[in-house]
Image: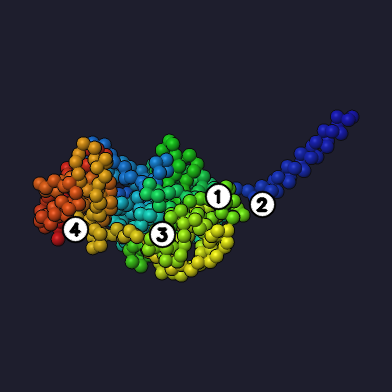
Amino acid sequence: MVGDIILKQFLTLFLFFGIFWSGQGESHGLPSFTGLIERASPAVVKIDTVQAETHQTTPSMPQSEAPETFQDLFEHRRNQPDLARSTGSGFVISSDGHVLTNYHVVVGASEIVVRLIDRREFDAEVIGVDSRSDLALLKIDSTDLPFLKFAMPGKLKVGEWVLAIGSPFDLDYSASAGIVSAIGRSIPTAKGENYVPFVQSDVAINPGNSGGPLLNLDGEVIGVNSQIFTRSGGSMGVSFSIPSSVALEVVGQLMAKGSVDRGWLGVFIQNVDKDLARSLGLVDPSGALVAQVEPGSPADKAGILAGDVIISFDGQNILHSTDLPHIVGLIAPGKKVIATIIREGEAMNMNIVIGTLPGAKAMTNAILENGVDKLGLEVSAVDRSRVGRWRGGVVVETVSLDSPAFHAGVKKGDIIIQIGYNSIDNLAEYRESLKAIPVGVLVPIRFIREGLSLNTSIKIEN
């Protein structure tokens, strides 16, 4: 009898909780992505590129500027002895054919083909690129194209459902879903630059997804897929996307002038830990501690000193030191802002006029006059420890798209040791050799790449 009563009570509770959780499932169930995929896929593109390999015996993957464990996401293939073919993704952002993708998808490419889901193909023109944000703006010759809109910055929240569409491992228009894991992730490049507050998600993205969109449930772009954290070469559930706030700013500048100017403050900063906070008179271990001020910089002119702690900049609180470059980089040069600092335990406001970040030069289809020579290169003196048994040379810092060096297959990081029959030992000898290069004639060029001496030919057309 007692057993029957207990069994009835158990069944009653089971039915109650079953109905309750069923109701919860109906109101808070997993979203359906089918409609979103159908609407968004026509605006997503596959990007195939071709790169010259300059007589290498093994494929060379473009070097990401991110730390080694963070890998870029485009698929590399090699079909011909001297050509490397790569696949990435992108998406149309305007009906007249503007396409956004990653910088690392198109850098060094001699051919860029954009493919739509309806199987149309277009040769793409590079409007402008920005290596610091890893973004590139392309243009294809078509009109009335479906396109994606960017989400308004500041609305994204951790835990939101997001969807990626792209071509992982050359599998066209694959979709994967997950949630936003974190916002404002800092991943400094090998140069120590840190201008992108990445969106982290657990969406499964892999090589080939590079440049594709990360979408919210409204079909708006909240990020551009750029990197993954991996020890296997594939997805481990930690991926990073360039947020819409950065993409909107970069796209606007690239459309207007083909290059990107970033705000510059001119300080070297470090994090504030608990002990530092206590010694500096801070309530909490937050803010950016100024370790050094660059002479003549906007910070120097404003009176900021080493030892100051910046806790607010242009109305935005600085919780971590890495927040500061994210904020400064998006401020237009010339704008006047207020920074709140702590100095000797006292808070004070400083008026600052934002400068232009040095070295922010465009790399477009045209050879630039400032800093780029007639081969389309920016070079610098080489650290002799990098050349091993080879002597001298100059190191390639940037290669302009569609330039003579670009078509010859020269890449960033190559060390040029000979042009024509002239050995290159330093910058002066390199500049003298440039003067001797005739127009319209193939000239041999020799350089070191990853310890190997390579030879190719280069020609200045006009």
Q: Which residue is drawn at 44% across and 36% down?
A: 231
Closest to the camera, between mark 3 and mark 1, is 1
Say what amino acid the circle numbered 1 marks: Leu
Q: How far apart are marks 4 and 1 (CA)?
A: 51 Å
Amino acid type of the residue tagged 3 in the rendering? Gly
- Between discs 3 and 4, the one toward the N terminus: 3
Q: Where is residue 248 in the image (x, y as percent from the top left)?
A: 44, 62
Q: In this view, does 102 lie to the left or right of 271?
A: left
Q: Which amino acid does label 2 sit on?
A: Ser
Local SS, label 1: helix
Which residue is denoted by mark 3 in the rendering? 266
Residue 393, position in %: x, y? 20, 46
User: Disc 2 designates what residue?
Assistant: 27
Q: Residues within 10 Å of mark 4 (few under 14, many from 20)?
A: some
Which residue in the structure is indicated by mark 1? Answer: 276
Q: Which of 232 and 434 is in front in this view?
A: 434
Q: Distance between the residues labelled 3 and 1?
A: 22 Å
Q: Which amino acid does label 4 sit on?
A: Lys
Query: Which type of secondary structure does the marked residue at label 3 adopt?
Result: loop
> Number of labelled discs?
4
* Of the pair 2 and 411, the residue shown nearer to us: 411
Q: Looking at the image, which residue is at 35% across and 67% down?
A: 256
Q: Which residue is drawn at 33% across and 54% down?
A: 114
Mark toward the start of the polypeptide (3 vs 1): 3
Secondary structure beneath label 4: loop
Q: Nearer the viewer, mark 4 or mark 2?
A: 4
Q: Which is nearer the eye, 355 or 157?
A: 355
Relative placement, left or right, of 203 versus 115 is right
Query: Which residue is labeled 4 in the image?
Result: 374
